[in-house]
Image: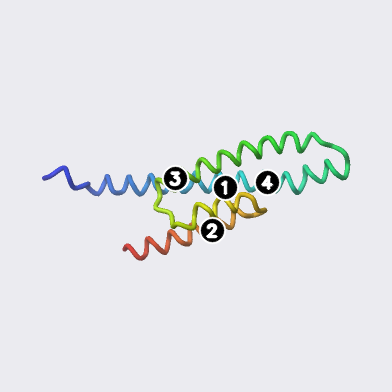
Amino acid sequence: MSQAQPNIKQVLNLRKEQNTTLKNLTIMGYLEGTSFLLLIGIAMPLKYMMGISEGVKYIGMAHGILFIAYIVVLMGAAIRIKMPLWAIPAGVLGSFLPFGPFIFDHFLKKSLKKSVKKEA
């Protein structure tokens, strides 16, 4: 038997790696989206209505780190998963909008399911 052809186990591992990558992207998107909502929904009103600026300082710092991590994970996922061309700009744009990462995640998974059905 030739080693040039991948066996079933190797193909399944590739799909498992892609699923893991997609899960990581989903988790990072949810963390980044939640931190953004906390920032604009709780920390900023506390700062501008009550003069309590500590929330913006800490939540803002956490959001900045999560934003950068999300962009890095998005770029890595684009390489590992065959994402449609619209996915990278939509993912970046979604990270600037409230609820954007959640909406992006929904449409990306919907698009990937369609592409898997076409291949099968």
The residue labelled by disc 2 is 106
Q: Amino acid at mark 1?
A: Gly
Which x, y percent locates residue 12? 31, 48
Give the crowd class for mark 3: few <14, some 14-19, many >=20 residues within 10 Å.
some
Which residue lies at the image location 54% right of the left edge and 52% below the top edge?
Answer: 91
Q: If you read the primary sequence from the N terminus, does the residue marked by circle 3 or circle 1 appear first?
A: 3
Disc 1 is placed on an element classified as helix
Location of the N terminus (image quadrant): top left
Name the side, left or right, on which 69 lies relative to 41.
left
Disc 4 is placed on an element classified as helix
Q: Amino acid at mark 2?
A: His
The residue labelled by disc 4 is 36
Which residue lies at the image location 53% right of the left edge and 48% below the top edge?
Answer: 26
The residue labelled by disc 1 is 29
Q: If you read the primary sequence from the N terminus, does the residue marked by circle 2 or circle 1 appear first?
A: 1
C-alpha separation, residue under disc 1 versus residue under disc 4: 10 Å
User: Disc number at residue 21?
Assistant: 3
Disc 2 is placed on an element classified as helix
Which residue lies at the image location 37% right of the left edge and 46% below the top edge?
Answer: 16
Q: Quadrant of residue 68?
A: top right
C-alpha separation, residue under disc 3 versus residue under disc 1: 12 Å
Which residue lies at the image location 42% right of the left edge and 48% below the top edge?
Answer: 19
Front of the two marks 4 and 3: 4
C-alpha separation, residue under disc 2 versus residue under disc 1: 11 Å
C-alpha separation, residue under disc 4 versus residue under disc 3: 22 Å
Give the crowd class for mark 1: few <14, some 14-19, many >=20 residues within 10 Å.
many
